[in-house]
Amino acid sequence: DAKTTQPPSMDCAEGRAANLPCNHSTISGNEYVYWYRQIHSQGPQYIIHGLKNNETNEMASLIITEDRKSSTLILPHATLRDTAVYYCIVRATDKLIFGTGTRLQVFP
Amino acid sequence: EAGVAQSPRYKIIEKRQSVAFWCNPISGHATLYWYQQILGQGPKLLIQFQNNGVVDDSQLPKDRFSAERLKGVDSTLKIQPAKLEDSAVYLCASSLDGRYTDTQYFGPGTRLTVL
C-alpha cells in the first residue's frame, strides 16, 4: 500500500470548516483513499473513502486531486466533538495500515 | 445495530503474568481483526480471522501472543507472559466479509498496563 503524509497537528475554530490534507504521491490506480478518526479513548471510526471522484456523506467531504496524488478531508462545520486524530489511509487490500495521523484540535 | 464489544476496558498486570482479552464482533461479520496501539502511534494489525480461520498473523509475536476465534464469532487474544513493552491499547475490529472495500468497525479497546 502507498505511503501517506499528513501534518502532525492542526487547529480549527468551532463552526468553521476544517480542511485536513493528505499526500499520497505513490498511489496506484486501484488504491482507495480512506479516512478514519479516533476520538480520545475510543476505537477508530470510519469517516469516508473514495477512488477518483469527490465523495460526500453526512460526516464529511473528500476531495481527491485529478492526479490522485493528494486529497483533502473537509469537515464543513467543525464542532468540539470533532477533536480527534484523523488518519488518511491508502488501501488496495483488506488491510488498514495506519500512520500517526493529524491531531485536529477544535477550539471554541 | 450493536457495535463491536470488548472486555475488559482496562487491565493492569505485573510483567510475566498472563492476560486475556475478549471481543464480540458485529453480528454477521465474518472477518475479525486484532490491533495493537502503542501510545502516540496508529493501530498495528496483529491478526486477522475469516470466520474461524486465520488469514494473516504475520505481525503476531507468536512466542507470547495467541488468539482464537472458535465457532467463528467471539475471539480471545492472550498474552503469556507479558512484557513491559506490551503496554498498549488492544483494539478489535470486524467487517462483513473482508473485501478491501469493506468498512472495518472498531470496538472501544482494552487498555493494558504492564508493571
Image (spheres, coloured by chain):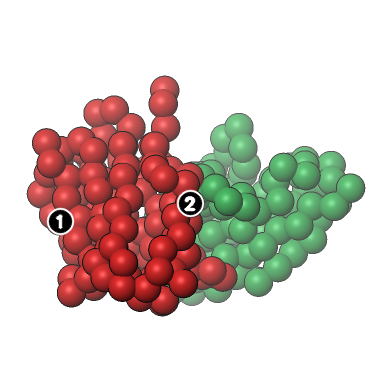
Q: Chain of mark 2?
A: B
State the SS at label 1.
Answer: strand
Q: Position of residue B34 (x, y in %)?
A: 31, 55
State the SS at label 2.
Answer: strand
Which residue occupies the extreme right position in the image? A108
Eyeballing the image, is A62 above or below B36?
above
Of residues A62 and A88, the one drawn nearer to the viewer in this rendering: A88
Eyeballing the image, is A70 above or below B2?
below
- Find residue A98 and report its image quarter: bottom left
- Mark 2 sits on what residue? B10
- The structure residue drawn at horizontal position 62% and vertical position 52%, both measured from the top left corner, is A40
The amino acid type, in three-letter code, at marker 1 is: Val
**Letter of the green chain:** A
Q: Position of residue B101 (x, y in %)?
A: 33, 46
Q: Chain of mark 1?
A: B
Chain-order first, disc 2 or disc 1: 2
Of residues A84 and B68, the one drawn nearer to the viewer in this rendering: B68
Tell me the mark number nearer the camera, choosing from 2 and 1: 2
Left/right placement of residue B36 relative to residue A14 reads left
The amino acid type, in three-letter code, at marker 2 is: Tyr
Left/right placement of residue B31 relative to residue B10 reads left
- The structure residue drawn at horizontal position 67% and vertical position 62%, both measured from the top left corner, is A103
Neighbours of disc 1 within 10 Å: few (<14), some (14-19), many (20+): some
Neighbours of disc 2 within 10 Å: few (<14), some (14-19), many (20+): few
Eyeballing the image, is B76 above or below B40?
above
**Letter of the red chain:** B
Dot 2 and dot 1 residues touching (CB under 8 Å): no
- Mark 1 sits on what residue? B55
